[in-house]
Image: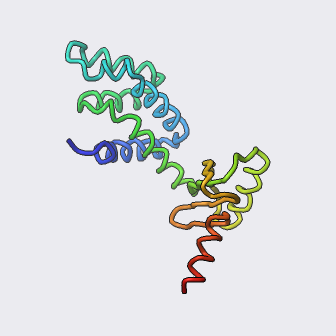
């Protein structure tokens, strides 16, 4: 079977184009997130693959969770007909990535040796946004850094961690 990301991509692109035409990107993102949550529920997952449950019943469940928008209902019907309702979490994730890209928001992951409070996260975000523009920031605690932080924005890495500095010293001494 094809990888879920590959199968989900055309649906995410179609939903994104439709939402953009309707100027309803935030509404579609919220609805797809709700639908993804329904699809991730283990009980619903068991229903999706159950041949004893009519697809129309499962489709009605997703339509109700979607909120009643006609276009979204048609999208759910298409997914149901093509047996792709289980792909909704990946469709939602890809849609969200396209939305952020359209809005000029980059994804940034900050690895920190210790947990950061809100003020520290705000300061780091402010510094990174000066260099990279608008960011959606997530923080990961990585004790192996020993101290400091390492920020990953796209394919760029800013490493001010103790372990990063030690590695730079090791390389310099071996050269």
The image position of residue 149, as x and y in percent, is 67, 59
The image position of residue 169, as x and y in percent, is 63, 77
The image quarter containing residue 129 is bottom right
The image quarter containing residue 164 is bottom right
Q: Is residue 109 visible?
A: yes
Total number of numbered discs in the rendering: 0
The N terminus - image quarter:
top left
Q: Residue at x 62, y 64 (%)?
A: 163
- Residue 78, compared with residue 16, is above or below; it is above
Q: Residue at x 59, y 82 (%)?
A: 172
Name the foreground residue: 16 vs 71. Answer: 16
Q: Residue at x 24, y 18 (%)?
A: 50
Q: Is residue 138 visible?
A: no
Q: Is residue 111 left or right of residue 101?
A: right
The C terminus - image quarter:
bottom right
Q: What colour scheme was applied to this rendering of the protein?
A: rainbow
Q: Is residue 119 left or right of residue 85?
A: right
Q: Residue at x 40, y 41 (%)?
A: 15
Q: Is residue 161 left or right of residue 50?
A: right
Q: Is residue 10 left or right of residue 21?
A: left
- Residue 140, compared with residue 27, is above or below; it is below
- Residue 63, compared with residue 112, is above or below; it is above
Name the foreground residue: 77 vs 162. Answer: 162
The image position of residue 173, as x and y in percent, is 60, 83
- Residue lying at the far right of the rendered structure: 119
């Amino acid at each position: 079977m094809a990888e879920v990301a590959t199968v989900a991509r055309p649906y995410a692109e179609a939903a994104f184009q439709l939402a953009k035409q309707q100027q309803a990107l935030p509404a579609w993102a919220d609805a797809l997130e709700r639908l993804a949550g329904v699809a991730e529920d283990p009980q619903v997952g068991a229903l999706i693959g159950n041949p004893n449950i009519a697809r129309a019943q499962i489709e009605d469940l997703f339509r109700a969770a979607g909120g009643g928008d006609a276009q979204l209902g048609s999208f759910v019907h298409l997914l149901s007909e093509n047996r792709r309702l289980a792909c909704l979490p990946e469709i939602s994730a890809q849609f969200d990535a396209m939305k952020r890209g359209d809005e000029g928001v980059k994804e940034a992951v900050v690895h920190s040796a210790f947990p950061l409070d809100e003020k520290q996260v705000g300061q780091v975000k402010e510094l990174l946004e000066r260099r990279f523009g608008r960011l959606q920031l997530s923080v990961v605690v990585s004790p192996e850094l020993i101290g400091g932080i390492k920020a990953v924005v796209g394919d760029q890495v800013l490493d001010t961690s103790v372990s990063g500095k030690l590695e730079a010293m090791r390389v310099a001494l071996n050269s």
